Amino acid sequence: MSTEAVLERYYAALRAGDVDLIRDVVSEDIEVVYQDADKLLPWGGVWTGFEAFRRFLGIVAEHLVIEKVEPVDRFLDGDTAIVVLNGVWTARATGKRVTAQVVNIFSVRDGKVARYRVYPDTAAFALGIGALEPRGNG
């Protein structure tokens, strides 16, 4: 199965929220690396294994409602894919809208997502969930 086909199945499984479909498209030892150097986001960090991946998805869902996510670029090279997304999310706790660009890097092994790295606009998400206060002008 091509990397592009795996990504299509991955995104479809996430949209459906079906655990069996998700399990079928990610490896049992999946590694999620969500960049968050300042530890501002509750879902930031490294998550290893399918159950940790499910917890990661649950924590994201506790904090954010996905309003719109649109791929704007996709780069494929063998078993690696880079997807650039523009998205809009609403933070559940604050009601603030988060508009951000996010880069996802996928590594595919044996027809499944084995590694999922996310490079978000951390400040935008932290401002949205109330983990960071905006600076004044002066």
Image (cartoon, rainbow, N blue to C red):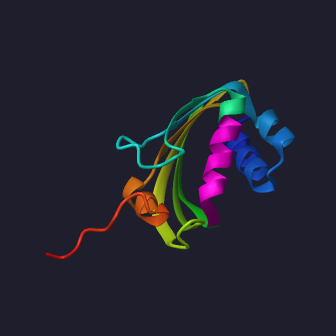
Question: What is the span of residues highlighted in magenta in the rendered image?
Answer: 53-66
Foreground of the two, 80 or 49 = 49
Q: Residue at x 72, y 24 (%)?
A: 110
Q: Residue at x 51, y 73 (%)?
A: 96
Residue 79, compared with residue 61, is above or below; it is above
Q: Residue at x 71, y 50 (%)?
A: 11
How far across and down, in percent of the image, does residue 115 sit?
59, 31
How far across and down, in percent of the image, does residue 85 sit?
53, 58
Foreground of the two, 25 or 65 = 65
Counting labels gives 0
Figure quadrant of the N terminus: top right
Foreground of the two, 75 or 18 = 18
- Horizontal side of 37 relative to 84 (left or right) equals left
Q: Residue at x 37, y 59 (%)?
A: 132
Residue 46, compared with residue 61, is above or below; it is above
How far across and down, in percent of the image, does residue 116 sit?
57, 37
Figure quadrant of the C terminus: bottom left
- Horizontal side of 32 relative to 7 (left or right) equals left
Whether residue 112 is visible to the viewer of this picture, yes or no, is no
